[in-house]
Amino acid sequence: VSFATSKISECARLALAHDAPVVLQYGPSGGYPPLRAHIAQSLGVHESQVIIGQGSLQLLDSLIRVMLSPGDVVFIEEPTYDRTLTLFRRAGANVVGIPLQPDGPDLDLINLHLQQGVRPKLFYVIPDFQNPSGVVMSAQKRQALVDLARKYGFQIVEDSPYRLLRFHGSDLPSIFSMAPDLVIHMSSYSKLIAPGLRVGWMASPTSTMQALLKFCEDTYINPSYFNQALVLEFIQQGWLEENISILKELYRPRLEAMLASLSENMEPPAVWSKPDGGFFVSLELNKPVQVPELFTRAKQAGLILTDGRGFFASGKGDSFIRLPFCALEPAEISEGIARLAKII
Ligand SMILES: Cc1ncc(COP(=O)(O)O)c(C=O)c1O
């Protein structure tokens, strides 16, 4: 189990000891001010440009409600995070999927859409160890997206909860750092401390943020300051960095086991991503499979799969399998992949 339970318990005690009157009271919708200031400082922006919410997904939902009207075009990578697709669909957006290549979304296709007059309001991307594919967007594509956003007047939503979980190699600049006036950046403590704390955040240009803060205040007054104060204590104790190192040590052998057993068991021309971090490897089969039958057989073999079609706006995805590696021991991963290969 990866949760630092006793440290979290100590942080809960410290949060109340240090700031009970604020932590237990209502407050502004932007979040617990000292944590907000900490996040703003780490990004090099003013704290009025940061909002902390009950997880980053809730903030994305609020952002979508503030920014999109039914029929508005949004670009997404295809595949993408299935919950985001649900949020866009719920808002009545016209979702255009841009196929993901091993170094990020297909720029030729983006250019084609734009040249044909398609005008997205938002482009939602997960550039670091993407959910569900594991892909990292190259520095060139990050820059190209910024240039296109500037030229055609759309905003980029950069969702980056896995960014700090890099096991090898070095970080690429965040898209936000390249164009803070065009990019809405979101991240979370869910994967770094514990998802049950529900502490995620978003940074955006001021004009968007004002509307977002008002919308959130009208919806839920303020997010739980207690959880946020607990997270700040965790950071101030030096435990966040320590925890990230512990998680990397825990997950790295799991990723290695996943990649090794794919090489051992999967027959080409099936291809899979080879990420340097995050939670996911993805497998692209050389032909579509009968998804219901795959599921039935996988279940009989004791494997739980997510329907690949849920990650595609177009409902494609019947040759796509997401392979999360973080929650299983290396031996379980090897065994699971061997069983999956037989079924396929
Ligand atoms: C890409 C992505 N965005 C957002 C989330 C949700 O994060 P949070 O727990 O902060 O709501 C997840 C969780 O799996 C995710 O993979």
Image (cartoon, helix red, strand yellow):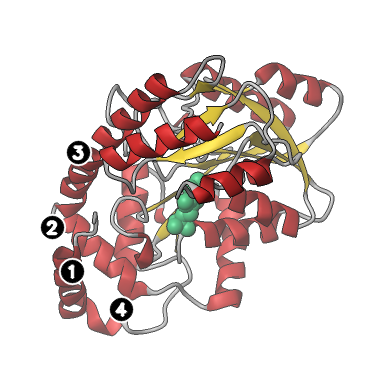
Q: Residue at x 40, y 20 (%)?
A: 263
Q: In the rendered image, which quarter is residue 217 located in?
A: bottom right
Residue assigned mark 1: 11
Res 229 quadrant in image? bottom left
User: Which residue is pictured at 74% across the width and 58% down the height?
Assistant: 91
Q: Which residue is mark 2?
A: 237
The Cα atoms of the two marked residues, 3 and 1, are separated by 23 Å
Q: Is mark 2 within 8 Å of ligand 1?
A: no
Q: Nearer the viewer, residue 181 or 339?
A: 339
Q: Mark 1: few, some, or many residues within 10 Å (few <14, many ≥20)? A: many
Foreground residue among 334 and 201: 334
Sequence-wise, the earlier of marks 4 and 1 is: 1
Q: Quadrant of the C terminus?
A: top right
Q: Tell me the distance, in whole angstroms, between the alpha carbons under discs 4 and 1.
A: 13 Å
For marks 1 and 2, the one nearer the N-term is 1
Q: Which residue in the structure is indicated by mark 3?
A: 249
- Which quadrant holds the N terminus? bottom left
- Marks 2 and 1: in contact by CB < 8 Å? yes
